[in-house]
Image: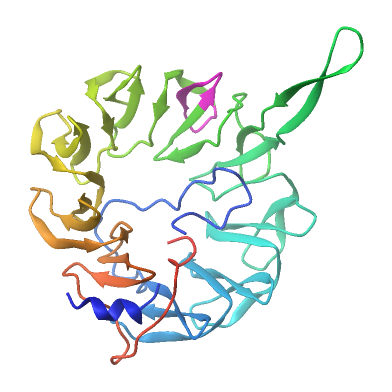
């Protein structure tokens, strides 16, 4: 691929969050598209302003915003000046810019925060469904959403003689779940930001990770040092120093024997042994021998891998389909992936071909918000 285009082309892998550990927007494994599904639009930047491309490379919404997030449920969060609002697929403002922070819509609701530092959820008309009383939040996964319940506080310790000592007492932030009516769900409070994937929520209780179900109740006891989300009915977890895989009952179906592991996707999971990454299937059988310096989840039938300092993509057999040449990459979603080379980035298709609008190029120094 001609690298010169990256001097001209553009596209936080994380949400523009108001919390310390807001989950990324969930990229799901490839599934059959419904005929009614509208084409996906991709945020791009040109001349310091953001607009949107479609997969053909055609500019469909002219660059005019100061920042832009992905379209979800037919709406996208955009920044005009210092405020966030929402546009529809025609580029028309549907909810006027008025928020300090805004997340993509999910489950019919959008997370927003004003200067008060309190957050809530609005519907598509901009009316509050959950009043702005929350300390932090994310996007709904099904009927639940993770929210911050308590702020992190630091106070100086008071000694036995009543003096203020040099030690500090840290009161950790707490996180939990609410439903679409704003009511708490379950009694579990997590010490770190929890997240839901496919009906199971990873939570940290007393320094250990476990899982809650849709009722917010602990169904897999907090026992792991680290835990990933559930994909294809399995989740990667670290027990002691090694990683294995559990099913929804908490049964360890692939014994801990890996230095690191990603969850199952496309029928394979990236695992590290001997300092190198390869891929296994859901039975734990090696499918691609360890050979990569880093590897990620597989989406759309391709997984990002790093050889040396450069990233490329392999198929499910481990065959390189896009040669390592990028400094940073995102996963493929509906046949398109964001990539970066040097200080600039852009979108490529599954063959590594750049998206462009009749030869025009787009400039940015960072990936689009929420991609």
Question: Residue 84 placed where, x, y %?
Answer: 65, 69
Q: Residue furthest front?
A: 166
Q: Residue at x 53, y 30 (%)?
A: 215
Location of the N terminus by quadrant is: bottom left
Q: Is residue 52 toward the left or the right of residue 149 in the image? A: left
Q: Is 211 a magenta residue?
A: yes
Of 157 and 12, nearer the camera is 157
Q: Is 118 a magenta residue?
A: no
Tell me if residue 315 comes above or below residue 280 in the rendering: below
Query: How many marks do you count on the picture?
Result: 0
Tell me if residue 177 comes above or below residue 343 in the rendering: above
Q: Confirm whether residue 191 shows in the render.
A: yes
Q: Residue at x 44, y 79 (%)?
A: 52
Q: Is residue 77 toward the left or the right of residue 62 in the image? A: right
Question: Residue 245 placed where, x, y %?
Answer: 27, 26
Q: Residue at x 46, y 24 (%)?
A: 209
Q: Confirm whether residue 249 shows in the render.
A: no
Location of the C terminus by quadrant is: bottom left
Q: Residue furthest right?
A: 162
Tell me if residue 196 comes above or below residue 18 in the rendering: above
Magenta stretch? 204-216
Q: Residue at x 56, y 72 (%)?
A: 67
Quadrant for residue 225, please give it: top left
Which colouring convention does the figure follow?
rainbow
Q: Residue furthest top?
A: 160
């Amino acid at each position: 691929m001609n690298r010169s285009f990256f001097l001209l082309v553009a596209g936080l892998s994380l949400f523009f969050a108001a919390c310390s550990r807001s989950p990324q927007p969930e990229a799901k494994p490839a599934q059959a598209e419904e005929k009614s599904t509208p084409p996906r639009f991709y945020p791009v930047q040109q001349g310091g302003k953001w607009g949107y491309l479609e997969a053909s490379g055609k500019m469909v919404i002219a660059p005019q915003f100061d920042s832009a997030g992905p379209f979800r449920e037919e709406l996208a969060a955009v920044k005009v000046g210092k405020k966030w609002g929402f546009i529809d697929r025609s580029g028309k403002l549907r909810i006027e810019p008025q928020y300090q922070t805004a997340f993509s819509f999910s489950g019919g609701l959008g997370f927003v925060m004003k200067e008060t530092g309190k957050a809530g959820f609005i519907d598509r008309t901009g009316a509050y469904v959950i009043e702005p009383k929350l300390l932090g939040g994310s996007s709904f996964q099904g009927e639940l959403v993770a929210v911050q319940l308590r702020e992190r506080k630091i106070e100086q310790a008071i000694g036995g003689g009543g003096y203020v000592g040099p030690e500090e007492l840290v009161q950790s932030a707490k996180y939990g779940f609410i439903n679409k009516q704003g009511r708490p769900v379950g009694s579990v409070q997590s010490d770190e930001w929890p997240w839901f994937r496919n009906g199971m929520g990873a939570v940290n209780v007393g320094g250990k990770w476990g899982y809650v179900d849709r009722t917010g109740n602990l169904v897999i006891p907090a026992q792991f040092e680290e835990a990933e989300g559930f994909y294809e009915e399995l989740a990667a977890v670290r027990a002691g120093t090694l990683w294995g895989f559990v099913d929804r009952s908490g049964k360890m179906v692939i014994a801990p024997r890996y230095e690191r592991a990603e969850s199952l996707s496309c029928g394979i999971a990236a695992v590290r042994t001997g300092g190198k990454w390869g891929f296994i299937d859901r039975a734990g059988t090696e499918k691609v021998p360890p050979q990569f310096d880093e590897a990620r989840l597989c989406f759309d039938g391709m997984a990002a891998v790093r050889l040396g300092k450069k990233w490329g993509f392999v198929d499910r057999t481990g065959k390189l389909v896009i040669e390592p040449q990028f400094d940073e990459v995102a996963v493929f979603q509906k046949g398109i992936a964001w990539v970066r080379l040097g200080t600039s980035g852009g979108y490529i298709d599954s063959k590594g071909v750049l998206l462009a609008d009749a030869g025009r190029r787009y400039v940015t120094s960072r990936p689009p918000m929420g991609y």
